[in-house]
Amino acid sequence: MIEEISYKKYFMFFLLFIFMEALLLMFVLKSTTLSLVMSMMILAAVFFLIYPEAGFAVALTSNVLIMIFFDSVKSPFPAPHLVVYLAMIVAALFIYSLKHGLDSEMVLGTPIKLSFYLWLLMILGLFVSSNPAYGRHKVIFYFFYNLLLIVLPLIFYKDFERLENIFKIAFLAGLVLALFSSLKALTVPDYIRFSPSESVNPIWLGRSLGISMLCGVFWFVTSKQGFTKILFLATIPFFLFPMFRTWSRAPLVGMLICVFLFYLLQPDQPLSRKIKISLPFLISSIIIILNTATHLVSRLRTPMIQEMSTAFRLLAWLKGWEYFMASPLTGVGTGGYYMKMIYGDFTYPHNLFLEVACENGIIGLAIMVVFVIIVLKMAGKNIRRYRTLGSDLLQLSIAVTVIFVYSLWNAMFSGAIYSNEIVWLSAGLIYVLYLSHQRSEERHQT
């Protein structure tokens, strides 16, 4: 149900709707593609009015769907998926903020301050960078992706039902992606690495499906309806099949590890029993992979120095370490990393810690390490505290912790800092859950 909103705010929504309708009518006369895009925007605006948290679910799993959509309609705009991605998040923030305020004191929390300090350090790194143009690109995207996404969860403080909806919507969006990808993968020969569209990197498809699976595990654990549990179990093959076909190892292996971790963090069972139950799960998962994912297994069995993708990453890591050792105090500057390769140049070392270390020096590395340690400590305190209280927020705390670990795992093998923004989003979710029980304890003591 929509919460009560003043007539003034309803009038604002009405004006926004009229404005979008007028734009749609104008575009109808010019381009059917633009008309389709505007129609989707109107539908999204109405949906966000009812479920503004859907805009934040976009950051978890729906970005790939947006890319597939714009690849299919051949939009004339440059980078339309990035624009819409940010527009959906900002729209959700605007609509949600009309209903709920934001406590400015929460923005001064340690994870957010560390993220902000890292951004300032990246700006300073532009002055010593050999490629300041790309460095400015990283600074801008880090602000609108990483910094924005670590602050956004704060608006869900004490409104955890909406927060849970993010995971449910993310799972459903991921299910749409999984079904589409599974059907399309059937039309692609086995010897070709699968991607659902030309703009979608197979690794990012695997990541998105992996996060959707983890969101589904959360829904499975918390749901009291048998239909929901059956639905999740029935959809597992549709998630795994396109993940196999991407031939991407890190997202698949990370997902299996995090499902295992999700179970280990569950309450009311001794650790020995959890291990006895989990080991058969892991062994059976490995057997399934070995017997169904031929190309993926081939990549896993190939020695690291002989497998091209892995060899390139090792070289990228070594180059990053070389940059760091050559200039440990300041680094080579934001955007300064560069390695020429046979099949394309590398502008980042495919490892989050190495990227920060080689470009922003020992201070940047220290900030990143402290950031991860503090977030993991907060996550541990959340789980222990909510387990002690027997709170419904325990499963939510476990879910966001597992997604943080999964995102951090993927960040060790691929992506630049701004394309690993889920690390910051999940850190923000952990932080807002930490604030909840911390403030409750403070009120109890006073």
Image: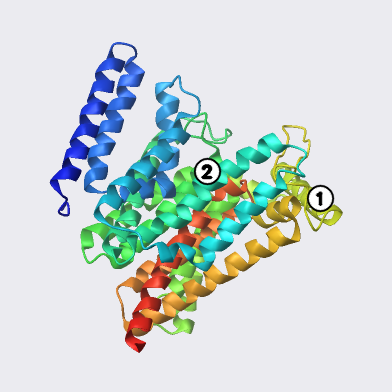
Asked if one can make out residue 268 in the rendered structure from this viewpoint, the answer is: no
Query: Is residue 276 rendered to the left or right of residue 316?
Result: left
Which of 364/193 is in front?
Answer: 364
Vertical comparison of 206 with 40: above or below: below
Query: Would you identify the image quadrant in which residue 193 lies?
Result: top right
Residue 226 at x, y percent in the picture: 22, 62
Name the residue beneath numbered marker 1: 323
Disc 2 residue type (three-letter)? Trp
| Mark 1 / mark 2, whichever is N-terminal | 2
The residue located at (27%, 38%) in the rendering is: 45
Instruction: In the displayed orientation, state which residue is furthest to the right.
Output: 326
The residue located at (67%, 37%) in the rendering is: 134
Asked if one can make out residue 112 in the rendered structure from this viewpoint, the answer is: yes
Disc 1 residue type (three-letter)? Tyr
Q: CA distance from mark 1 to mark 2?
A: 27 Å
Which of 117/380 is in front?
Answer: 117
Residue 418 at x, y percent in the picture: 57, 46
Q: Helix, strand, or loop for circle 1?
A: helix
Query: Would you identify the image quadrant in which residue 267 lies?
Result: bottom left
Query: Is residue 157 rendered to the left or right of residue 253?
Result: left
The residue located at (37%, 49%) in the rendering is: 57
Vertical comparison of 241 with 230: above or below: above
Q: Residues within 10 Å of mark 2 (few under 14, many from 20)?
A: many
Residue 133 at x, y percent in the picture: 68, 34
- The mark found on residue 204 in the picture is 2
Q: Residues within 10 Å of mark 1 (few under 14, many from 20)?
A: many
- The mark found on residue 113 in the picture is none
The residue located at (74%, 44%) in the rendering is: 127
Which of 289/78 is in front?
Answer: 78
Residue 7 at x, y percent in the picture: 13, 45
